[in-house]
């Protein structure tokens, strides 16, 4: 078997996690300052605090409660998040450095530039050392005013993080007016198609899972969408060999309840449940971070988070390079080793998906189905293997059913073997 031993995987995962433990905690740093309580509270609500904690060599331009009310009183959380992310500079500026800017003016990148699609240089801030010791901040967009200025130093942990107070937020063109679409207005299908995830989008629609996604958005949703290349990759199981219920579980596995932007993923230590998680299976994901790169692990495979399609509270959409294969459906190793392990008497049913939506029965036009899998995928399981899990399936399609059950039987046996070897070692 080519698969890594579970203990090794666990060890590697924990080693990687150790490296992501944050050096500072902005929430704690500001907690002793009641004048920044609003600012601090919004850093938490927008999850920008996680992003700030996952970085070093940064500067946070803090607004006092009065300056905060200018944006919070009449803007949605997504706009507030953009405004605050433009106040997080990805460079370290303490008071002396502010006054030593070469030629007296510079452009610096901000968190706003890193989240989603900010056109041109709108995610950059102009810092200018003005006469009389004053330092002004403005949008880097041409024609912008220096509408904010340095008022005082709050706290520094050299050279990891500096917190400075400024007089007001920085108004970049479109920041407040071109309000990010409210999450309920976002057409998830269209956003996925535009991001190069047409196959995934069509599977969501064909299996009705898009409705589950849409109804989850209001309370927060994070989608990990495999791009079209991912479905063509060698080793991707033949989806036409899965039951409808299994496809639904697979699609639900690619999203989680809750708004989880990249900075929050970076600081995530626990396994993340997904929409597929229920009594019948954990269906969770673990996260590792190396620098700016975030990787999701299923236990069967891993995928880098490739791109941010949308980061707009309460909805985050990312693309991933690989189809995420849950152990509950695809086992630890695809090798169809005949295992004499006792057959499971408890139902290994692939998730009686609670919220299984819509017209799942129709053998949908599997236009999106990827090419047939190579021989080493679970699809290669012998079709006449014992079908001791046949009863657990909800499918009515007898022909596809036997084959699939056989596959499942093998997988279930393999996973229980792996689990027991893990428990015993
Ligand atoms: C600064 O960050 C580094 C890297 O995360 C950390 O090892 C170090 O302890 C931090 N320095 C301080 C003074 O907290
Ligand atoms: C940061 O500090 C706050 C308040 O002290 C605490 O609630 C939170 O759990 C801390 N976050 C981390 C990641 O340690
Ligand atoms: C920053 O803005 C000031 C005032 O608009 C402008 O004179 C200066 O050239 C800008 N700095 C940079 C680096 O673009
Ligand atoms: C969302 O976009 C898809 C694909 O672009 C389109 O077929 C569908 O009608 C749109 N839905 C709504 C509600 O506009």
Image (spheres, grey):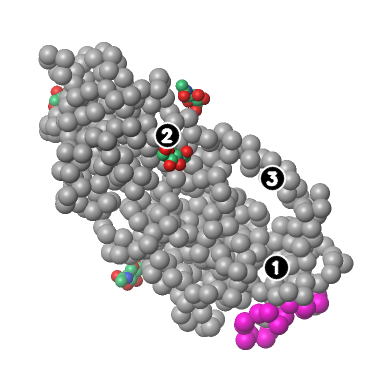
Tell me how far mark 1 sits from mark 3, CA to CA: 25 Å
Residue 180: mark in rendering: none
Answer whether residue 380 is visible to the viewer in this image.
no
Label 3 CB less than 8 angstroms from ligand 2: no
The residue wearing badge 1 is 379
Crowd around label 3: few <14 · some 14–19 · many ≥20 (10 Å): some
Residue farthest along the right direction in this orientation: 340
The residue wearing badge 2 is 25
Label 2 CB less than 8 angstroms from ligand 2: yes
**Is residue 373 highlighted in magenta?**
no
Secondary structure at badge 3 equals helix
Chain part drawn in magenta: 385-399
Which mark sits nearer the N-terminus, 2 or 1? 2
Foreground pick, 11 / 361: 11
Tell me how far mark 2 sits from mark 1, CA to CA: 48 Å
Crowd around label 2: few <14 · some 14–19 · many ≥20 (10 Å): some
Q: Residue at x 54, y 66 (%)?
A: 276
**Marks 2 and 1 in Cβ contact (< 8 Å):** no
Q: Residue at x 31, y 27 (%)?
A: 163
Q: Residue at x 24, y 49 (%)?
A: 79
Secondary structure at badge 2 equals loop
The residue wearing badge 3 is 9
Q: Of discs 2 and 3, which sits in the foreground? A: 2
Foreground pick, 381 / 67: 67
Q: Residue at x 38, y 40 (%)?
A: 49
Q: Of discs 2 and 1, which sits in the foreground? A: 2
Which mark sits nearer the N-terminus, 2 or 3? 3
Secondary structure at badge 1 equals helix
Q: Position of residue 2 (x, y in %)?
A: 76, 50
In the rendered view, does 198 fall on the left or right side of 345? left
Tell me how far mark 2 sits from mark 3, CA to CA: 29 Å
């Amino acid at each position: 078997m080519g698969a890594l031993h579970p203990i090794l995987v666990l060890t590697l995962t924990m080693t990687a996690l150790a490296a992501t433990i944050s050096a500072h905690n902005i929430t704690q740093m500001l907690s002793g300052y009641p004048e920044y309580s609003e600012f601090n509270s919004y850093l938490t609500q927008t999850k920008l605090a996680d992003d700030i904690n996952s970085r070093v060599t940064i500067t946070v331009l803090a607004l006092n409660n009065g300056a905060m009310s200018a944006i919070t009183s009449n803007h949605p959380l997504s706009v507030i998040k953009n405004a605050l992310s433009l106040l997080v500079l990805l460079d370290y500026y303490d008071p002396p450095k502010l006054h030593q800017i070469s030629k007296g003016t510079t452009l610096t990148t901000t968190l706003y530039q890193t989240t989603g699609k900010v056109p041109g240089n709108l995610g950059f801030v102009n810092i200018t050392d003005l006469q009389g010791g004053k330092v002004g901040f403005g949008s880097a967009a041409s024609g912008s005013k220096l509408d904010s200025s340095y008022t005082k130093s709050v706290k520094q942990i050299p050279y990891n993080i500096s917190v400075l107070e400024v007089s007001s937020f920085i108004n970049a063109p479109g920041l407040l007016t071109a309000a990010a679409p409210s999450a309920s207005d976002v057409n998830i299908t269209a956003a996925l198609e535009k991001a190069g995830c047409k196959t995934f989008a069509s599977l969501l629609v064909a299996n009705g899972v898009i409705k589950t996604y849409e109804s989850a958005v209001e309370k927060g949703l994070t989608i990990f969408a495999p791009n079209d290349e991912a479905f063509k990759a060698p080793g991707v199981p033949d989806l036409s060999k899965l039951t409808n219920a299994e496809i639904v579980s697979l699609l639900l596995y690619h999203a989680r309840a809750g708004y989880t932007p990249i900075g929050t993923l970076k600081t995530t230590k626990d396994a993340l449940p997904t929409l597929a998680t229920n009594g019948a299976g954990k269906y969770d994901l673990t996260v590792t971070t190396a620098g700016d790169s975030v990787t999701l692990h299923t236990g069967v495979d891993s995928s880098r988070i490739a791109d941010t399609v949308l980061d707009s509270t309460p909805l985050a959409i990312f693309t991933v390079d690989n189809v995420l294969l849950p152990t509950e459906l695809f086992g630890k190793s695809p090798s169809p080793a005949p295992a004499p392990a006792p057959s499971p008497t408890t139902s290994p049913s692939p998730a009686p998906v609670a919220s299984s939506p819509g017209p799942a029965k129709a053998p949908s036009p599997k236009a999106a189905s990827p090419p047939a899998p190579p021989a080493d995928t679970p699809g290669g399981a012998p079709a006449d293997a014992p079908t001791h899990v046949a009863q657990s399936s909800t499918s009515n399609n007898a022909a596809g059913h036997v084959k699939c059950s056989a596959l499942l039987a093998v997988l279930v046996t393999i996973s229980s073997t792996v689990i027991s070897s893990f428990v015993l070692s």
